[in-house]
Amino acid sequence: MIRMDVTELWSQIAHWLGRHAPVTAAALRPPVQEPDFVELEGEFSVELPDELRALWICCGGTEGDVLADVLPPFYTPYGAHQALSAWRDHRKTWTAQWDRPACDYYAGSPGSSFHPSWIPIAGDGFADELVVDLRPGSLRGCVLEWEQEHAQVLRPEWQGITAMLADVHRALTDGAPAGHSYPTVTEDGRLDWQIR
């Protein structure tokens, strides 16, 4: 089995969407320009992993509030600027706990307030998000699901961005589940994930 990197996986996913879910494909945008990673790292106060940099070099998210549920079960990928905006919103919301979040120290561990080292990479259009966990530890870079209503993350959904995209790619090309979701395409050409 050939192992693909983030750029190859994103390209393959976008190609599949273009052929099978054109409305979803049309909603995705390439970055207007390569993100300023020095500026982003300065604001986030963390070093961004290569996987995240690669994702933001090839994925610019969507325009405005347009949803494109590329990531299961209902998440639209963010470009770098959307991610920064979402992170800033969390910083405002969680000001009182920003310096002392109610979270365990190590990456992949649970938390019940938003942690500054969680970088949003996708949202559901409401308040739940997928975040890359950049706390220290062996699971640094894993992908967590932030549940706004319960103000928590529980466990890693994927070991990293490459693993997440590989799972999505396999689900699309093989009709297999990605996590607990199966891909379907609506009659009007949108990718939809069915939870089973």
Image (cartoon, grey):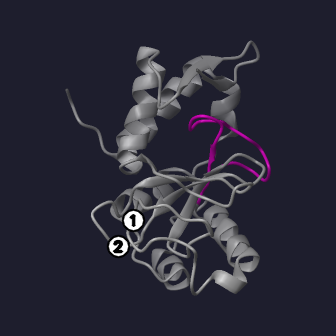
1 or 2: tag closer to the N-terminus: 1
Could you say where residue 191 lies in the image, as x and y percent from the top left? 64, 25
Residue that lies at the very extreme toward the left in this rendered image: 1
Provide residue 128's location: percent of width, then percent of height: 68, 52
Residue with the mark numbered 2? 136
Residue found at x 38% / y 60%: 141
Q: Which residues are magenta?
A: 62-79
Taking the spot 56% from the left edge, 21% from the top edge, the residue there is 183
Picture coordinates of residue 194, whole percent (x, y)? 63, 22
Q: Is residue 72 magenta?
A: yes
Q: At label 2, which amino acid type do we have? A: Pro
Element marked by disc 2: loop
- Find residue 152 and report its horizontal and vertical position in percent: 61, 59
| Residue occupying the point 57% across, 74% down | 102
Image position of 195 with respect to 162: above or below: above
- Front residue (pair 180, 65): 180
Say what amino acid the circle numbered 1 marks.
Ala
Q: Are marks 1 and 2 in contact (CB under 8 Å)?
A: yes
Which quadrant is home to the C terminus? top right
Image quadrant assignment for residue 115: bottom right
Does the magenta segment cover residue 174? Answer: no
**Numbered mark located on residue 161 in the image:** none
| Residue behind mark 1 | 107
From the viewer's side, name the closer residue of 40 and 137.
Answer: 137
Residue in the picture at 48% in, 83% down: 45
- Tag 1: Cα neighbours inside 10 Å, few (<14), some, or many (≥20)? many
Q: Report the quarter where the N terminus lies.
A: top left
Q: Secondary structure at mark 1?
A: loop
Q: Above or below — where is 143 with respect to 1?
A: below
